[in-house]
Amino acid sequence: MLLTVAAVIVAGAMVVLVAFLIPLILELRKTAVSLRETVLRMEAEITPTIAELNRTLADVQLLTGGVSEKMEDIQCFMSAVGETGRGLRTIGSVVSGVAGAFTASSVWMTGAKVAGSIMMEKLKQKRG
């Protein structure tokens, strides 16, 4: 009799356990299906995004390659501009030197003309 009561209690416990486990198992199954659908949808959305990212990366690599080529051209141009500036500075100093020489000779010429005219006037006064 004791064995029968124990068997009934175990059977009741099993029924209660199964009654609670069935909804849990059904809910887990729904969650697994939903998770699978979500993973498939994310995979479908990520694939074009990765392709777009690869195209963008290729474009960026092209741009950086073009920029590095242009930087060499710019460096060459800036070097030429520097050489031109140095040439202009040299020309400016030569012109300044020539202008200084003309100014000095002009002063001497003016002084000589003035001195000559004064001497001519004095000679005219002595003779005249």
Image (tube, helix red, strand yellow):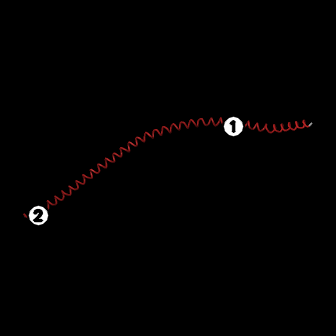
Residue at 28% across, 51% down: 93
**Badges 2 and 1: C-beta atoms under 8 Å apart?**
no
Residue 75: give x, y in percent of width and height. 40, 43
**Quarter placement of the C terminus:** bottom left
Compared with residue 13, is residue 116 higher up or lower down, i.e. above or below? below
Kindly state the secondary structure of the residue where label 2 is placed. helix
Amino acid carrying label 2: it is Lys
Amino acid carrying label 1: it is Leu
Residue at 69% across, 37% down: 35
Numbered badge on residue 24: none
Residue found at the very far left of the displayed protein: 127
- In three-dimensional space, the C-alpha distance between marks 2 and 1, rounded to whole angstroms, equals 123 Å
Query: How packed is label 1: few (under 14 Cα within 10 Å), some, or many (20 or more)?
Result: few
Residue at 37% across, 44% down: 79
Report the front residue among 36 and 45: 36
Query: How packed is label 2: few (under 14 Cα within 10 Å), some, or many (20 or more)?
Result: few
Residue 67: give x, y in percent of width and height. 45, 41
Residue at 44% across, 40% down: 68
Residue 3: give x, y in percent of width and height. 90, 36
In this picture, residue 78 sits left or right of residue 64: left
The residue that disc 1 covers is 35
- Of mark 2 and mark 1, the one earlier in the sequence is 1
The residue that disc 2 covers is 122
